[in-house]
């Protein structure tokens, strides 16, 4: 209470849970020094601590055995040292990504990251290297971090520039308080081209044609095992260039392709909910159809899938009501097919009662 102030240190409430278990206490520090003091106290008392941004991904990956102190980063917010000409900015990690993008847009810039978690903070995004459709062209958020400031587990301040200007985010054991980010110009125009994809088998040729046009993203939404799905491609840049490339791809795809300045409603949105099991498949774009058919065969029915058809990285949805043993069987069956194709399958998120019984993604699986 002395560290964060009487209004910013409290006993946990029913909403303050991690892996289905209520934590002990919640601290909401406003400065990096306060974070250090909290972690020093936690270490001295032999307790455990975990940072929380918006909480949108706090239950992803391997479940926690228990958390004594939840460090809420909501007051660690803001941007400073914004070098418009140098295209860099230092950002507190509790800053919502959407708020950061809005501030950067005023200067004609953006961080080329579009995490599907709508309430994502900069710190939460970096912790799991969460990327959306723009990853196809620009890579992951971690690739745009030149340095970070953090407080380690025993309360000592530290920083990391990493090799080639990229800090090893996955190796940091502590609370990241700020990050220096590389920025890109805000595109003048955006155009989406969409076409129906009745089955996964049709993805191959459609994606190949889109890839040649150098788009910013290639996303697929297959809501029922590929039945009645959609492939959408994003073009960005100068108005004339974006429109020309979009219309050219639409012509190559043929009748049924549509060009629009508005993204599909499913664009950049996860297909799963909190009570679902989220399975991430990663394989080459050419082998993605085979992986989707293998998943459908293993499940024995339709499986909603959404993600980057251009990269072969998608999320599939399994019902959270399935027994953990059945989920394990499905994942192992798909892994067997992907093994020969240098692909991977990991369970990213699941209801707490399931997550404790199945193999979940580890921290390095997110990078």
Image (cartoon, rainbow, N blue to C red):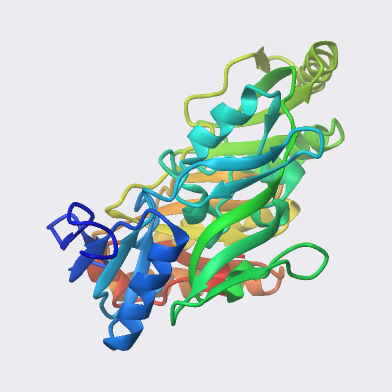
Q: Is residue 214 above or below residue 72?
A: above
The answer to which image quadrant residue 247 occupies is: top right
Residue shown at the point (41%, 47%) measured from the top left: 302
Counting from the top left corner in percent of width and height, residue 294 is at 55, 61
Q: Quadrant of the N terminus?
A: bottom left
The answer to whether residue 195 of the structure is visible from this angle is: no
Q: Quadrant of the C terminus?
A: bottom right
Relative depth, front residue between 104 and 260: 104
Residue shown at the point (63%, 25%) measured from the top left: 105
Residue shown at the point (36%, 60%) measured from the top left: 58
Q: Is residue 26 above or below residue 336?
A: above
Q: Is residue 176 above or below residue 227?
A: below
The answer to whether residue 80 of the structure is visible from this angle is: yes
The answer to which image quadrant residue 340 occupies is: bottom right
Counting from the top left corner in percent of width and height, residue 82 is at 68, 38
Q: Is residue 306 above or below residue 215?
A: below
**Numbered circles on residues, count:** 0
Counting from the top left corner in percent of width and height, residue 183 is at 72, 40
């Amino acid at each position: 209470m002395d560290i964060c102030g009487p209004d910013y240190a409290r006993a946990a409430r029913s909403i303050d849970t991690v892996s289905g278990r209520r934590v002990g206490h919640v601290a909401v520090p406003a400065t990096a020094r306060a974070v250090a003091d909290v972690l020093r106290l936690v270490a001295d008392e032999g307790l455990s601590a975990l940072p929380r941004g918006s909480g949108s991904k706090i239950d992803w990956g391997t479940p926690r055995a228990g958390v004594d102190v939840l460090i809420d980063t909501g007051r660690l917010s803001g941007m400073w040292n914004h070098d418009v000409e140098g295209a860099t900015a230092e950002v507190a990690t509790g800053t919502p990504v959407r708020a950061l993008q809005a501030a950067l847009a005023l200067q004609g810039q953006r961080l080329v990251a579009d995490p599907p978690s709508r309430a994502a903070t900069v710190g939460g995004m970096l912790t799991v290297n969460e990327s959306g459709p723009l990853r196809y062209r620009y890579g992951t958020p971690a690739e745009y971090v030149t340095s970070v400031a953090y407080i380690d587990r025993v309360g000592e301040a530290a920083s990391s520039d990493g090799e080639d200007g990229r800090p090893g985010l996955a190796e940091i054991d502590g609370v990241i308080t700020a990050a220096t980010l590389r920025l890109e110009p805000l595109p003048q125009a955006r155009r989406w081209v969409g076409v129906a994809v009745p089955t996964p088998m049709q993805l191959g040729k459609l994606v190949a044609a889109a890839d040649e046009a150098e788009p910013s993203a290639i996303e697929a939404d297959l809501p029922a095992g590929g039945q009645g799905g959609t492939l959408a491609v994003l073009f960005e840049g100068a108005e004339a260039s974006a429109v020309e490339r979009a219309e050219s791809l639409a012509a190559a795809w043929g009748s049924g392709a549509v060009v629009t300045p508005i993204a599909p409603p499913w664009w950049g949105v996860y297909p799963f909910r909190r009570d679902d099991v989220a399975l991430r498949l990663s394989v080459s774009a050419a082998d993605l159809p085979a992986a989707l058919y293998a998943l459908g065969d293993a499940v024995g029915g339709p499986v909603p899938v959404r993600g980057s058809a251009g990269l072969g990285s998608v999320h599939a949805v399994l019902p959270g009501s399935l027994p953990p043993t059945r989920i394990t069987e499905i994942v192992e069956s798909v892994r067997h097919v992907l093994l020969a194709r240098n692909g991977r399958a990991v369970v990213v998120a699941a209801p707490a009662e399931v997550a404790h019984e199945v193999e979940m993604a580890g921290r390095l699986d997110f990078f």
